[in-house]
Amino acid sequence: MPYIDLITNVKLSEDKQLEVVQALSKTGASVLGKPESYMSASYTHNSSLIFAGTTDPCFQIRLISIGLTVEKCPEVSRALSEILKNLMGLDSSRGYMQLTDPTAERTGYSSTTFGELWK
């Protein structure tokens, strides 16, 4: 159920958006050690997003993944930063990443929660 949500003030063509979310999905699955079939990723353009008081290219990423450990977070941050740099030219110091374990009991799926499904 990992989900990666990218919000940025960098406007991308539809083809580039798809390339970026596919890279986020593939890399996210790899670094998290989960099948890509479980992944979800999205891109949102927000022209009014600012960071450090400027409208220079910036981003915010929210990644949620059941079981994400604190020890794994630096590796995840590095991997996602590489995508932002290589595909969008974004500097990793121009945004924040919120990396969260929402817990199985607090994650809904198929009219229940993963906590209930995994009992």
Image (cartoon, grey):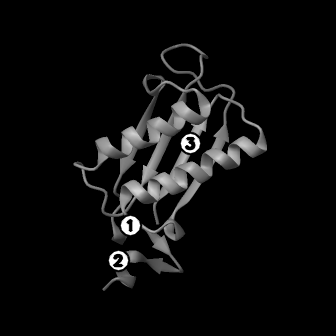
**In the image, residue 107 above or below residue 111:** above
Q: Earlier in the sequence, mark 3 or mark 2?
A: 3
**Is the residue marked by circle 1 packed among few (<14), some (14-19), or many (20+) residues within 10 Å?**
some
Q: CA distance from mark 3 to mark 2?
A: 27 Å
| Quadrant position of the C terminus in the picture | bottom left
Q: Residue at x 46, y 66 (%)?
A: 1
**As drawn, is 48 to the left or to the right of 13?**
left
Q: Earlier in the sequence, mark 1 or mark 2?
A: 1
Residue indicated by mark 3: 6
**Is the residue marked by circle 3 packed among few (<14), some (14-19), or many (20+) residues within 10 Å?**
many
Looking at this view, name the residue that lies furthest to the left: 71
| Amino acid type shown at disc 2 | Gly
> Residue 20 is drawn in which quadrant?
top right
Residue contact at pointers 1 and 2, CB within 8 angstroms: yes
Q: CA distance from mark 1 to mark 2?
A: 8 Å
- Percent coordinates x, y for residue 26 in the rendering: 52, 56
> Residue 113 is drawn in which quadrant?
bottom left
Q: Secondary structure at mark 1?
A: helix
Residue indicated by mark 2: 115
**As drawn, is 110 to the left or to the right of 44?**
left
Label of residue 106 in the image: 1
